[in-house]
Image (cartoon, rainbow, N blue to C red):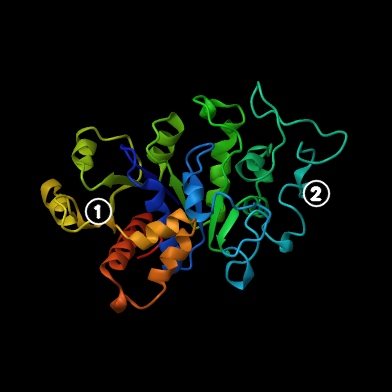
Amino acid sequence: MRIAFWSEQKKAGTAFNLAAVASTAVCLYPLSVAVVSGGYHDKKLERKFFQENRQESGQDPMLTGEEFGQSPMLAGEEFGQSPMLTGEEFGQSPMLAGNEAAPVLAAETQEFVLFSGLDCLLARECREDLTEEIVRANMRQIVKDRLYYLPTSVRPEYEWWHRDCRFARMNRVMDAVESYFDLVFIDCGSRQDDYARKLFREADVCVMNMNQSTEVIGRFYSHPPDIQGELFFLIGRYFENDLYNRANLQRIYRLEEERLGAIPYNPYLHAAERMGKMDNGVKSYVGAGGEEKRTEFEKELVRTTNLILKLAGVVS
């Protein structure tokens, strides 16, 4: 099940909204969730969960210990080996050390050593090589056994990145990730490239993100994109007293109540985002008490998450 977040406008908080909804989903339900960027080298989503200066192989207080399990880049000792070098399963992969190893051509004009994450998965020659063990080993664990992030490529992103011969394998990587998780959240941002539009068009649930001060819904219905999945509108940095609040938007556009959600502005959650601790920020609210104790912010966040999950068919 794929849920794609996209916006027609820049700075609509698409990555923030996705991170908040995905974190809330794993707080509320026993789901396994993967979050994926819709760009080749886009780090916006990663920064919601991980600090930029974090050492990949070092110890991190948020991702070590009994609560969050093992190091995010190395999926754990239960696999018995590094995710980059999985022995005979990798066959004659150029990732293996040795005199016979050939360099990996990531594009016709470039070659370099692949390490982990998306680059490693794209190097697999066959879909059968993308086992659950290999996929999870090349993802960063955010919440133990519940929430994972697929690191993007180390390569710079050029205009032609989605036409790269190696990136042509992305479809089967996405299929593999989807097969091993209950939900896959995809951050398409406000990207206009063909691949991002394809992800949004083919998603099971399409979440259209917007600022409260702009009239995105009207433009959307006057020039609707070609989508296959269920449509959901999401207002980020929401203020109930603004002109375009949920009640007015539903009345003006005769929008069904279950098709419009909101995530109110919350300075503490935005502070957690800047520190790369989005999941902990959400958990401090959603996991703090029962429904009767929830603030308006929590109620809107939980309501929005439930509506999206209902459209996806994973909750009733």
Q: Is disc 1 placed on a helix, strand or loop?
A: strand
Task: Indicate the position of residue 107 as horizontal and vertical percent values.
Answer: 64, 25
List the single residue furthest toward the right. 99
Q: Which residue is mark 2?
A: 87
Direction from residue 227 to residue 129 in the image, left or right: right
Q: Amino acid at mark 2?
A: Gly
Q: Which residue is mark 1?
A: 260
- Residue shown at the point (38%, 64%) measured from the top left: 315
- Residue shown at the point (29%, 57%) measured from the top left: 265
Task: Indicate the position of residue 313 as horizontal and vertical percent values.
Answer: 38, 58
Q: Amino acid at mark 1?
A: Leu
Q: Quadrant of residue 191?
A: top left
| 211 is higher (above) or lower (below) than 111 | below
Q: Is residue 204 visible?
A: no
Direction from residue 92 to residue 157 in the image, left or right: left
Residues at marks 1 and 2, CA–CA distance in whole angstroms: 49 Å
Q: Is residue 54 visible?
A: yes
Between residue 184 and residue 77, name the one nearer to us.
Answer: 77
| 283 is higher (above) or lower (below) than 214 | below
Between residue 91 and residue 208, name the one nearer to us.
Answer: 208
- Residue shown at the point (33%, 41%) measured from the top left: 7
In the picture, the quarter occupied by the C terminus is bottom left
Q: Are marks 1 and 2 in contact (CB under 8 Å)?
A: no
* Few, some or many residues within 10 Å of mark 2 (<14, 14–19, 20+): few
- Residue shown at the point (39%, 51%) measured from the top left: 16
Q: Is disc 2 placed on a helix, strand or loop?
A: helix
